[in-house]
Amino acid sequence: MSEVADTRRLNSKPQDLLDAYGPPSNFLEIDVYDPQTIGVGRTRYTTYEVRMRTNLPIFKLKDSCVRRRYSDFEWLKNELERDSKIVVPSLPGKALKRQLPFRSDEGLFDESFIEERRMGLEQFINRIAGHPLAQNERCLHMFLQDESIDRNYIPGKVRH
């Protein structure tokens, strides 16, 4: 004798307007945008605006905006690899060939390259910040919310 699976639907309450259009229960949005190239010659570099909006209680600021350069993203990646137990995603490449002289384009400062890198950095930071274990790391909070990065900080967990 074979048993028939129970296929009745669970009783659920109908969705109201607040459920449908209200704020999500937990959200974390990070945008990397507005690239700006600064300096001339060998001291030239590009910075990106990193804006975070969240309602997660672990973050002290619910809306923050900081400016970061590629080397700051590298710093964050290295800190997380050293101090946390998470698998850290890779950054967009260093683009060493773009740094060679006598190029027909702007190299590292070519608009299409900057946009490609911006998208890669945005994907990287969203993947990291979305990880529950990474959200406890002091270096991530500093990267997302402090105006400047204190490279002499004491690694550790954030208490909330």
Image (spheres, rainbow, N blue to C red):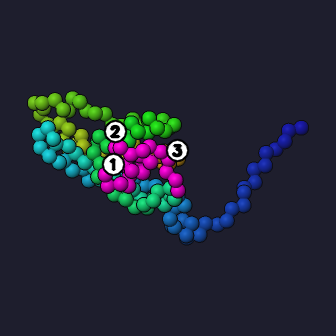
Classify 10 Å Cα crowding around label 1: few (below 14), some (14-19), many (20 and above): some
Position of 107 with respect to 120 (left or right) is left
Quarter in which the N terminus is drawn: top right
Q: Secondary structure at mark 3?
A: loop
> Is tag 3's residue or tag 2's residue first in the polypeptide sequence?
2
In the image, residue 6 lies in the stretch drawn in magenta: no
Front residue of 66/124: it is 66
- Of the two numbered discs 1 and 2 in the rendering, the one whose residue sits closer to the viewer: 1
Q: Position of residue 156 (x, y in %)?
A: 47, 45
The answer for how far apart the CA atoms under marks 1 and 3 are is 20 Å
Can the viewer see residue 98 in this picture? Answer: yes
Q: Residue at x 18, y 41 (%)?
A: 109
The residue singled out by tag 2 in the image is: 74
Residue 133's disc is 3
Identify residue for label 1.
Answer: 149
At x 51% / y 59%, what residue is drawn? 57
Q: Residue at x 44, y 43 (%)?
A: 155
Vertical placement of residue 50 versus 23, above or below: above
Give how far apart the Cα atoms at labels 3 and 2 are: 19 Å
The type of residue carrying mark 2 is Glu
**Magenta part of the chain:** 138-160
Question: What is the chief secondary structure element of the magenta stretch?
Answer: loop
Is 146 contained in the magenta span? yes
Q: Callout 1: helix, strand or loop?
A: loop
Where in the figure is residue 64, as x and y percent of width and height?
37, 59
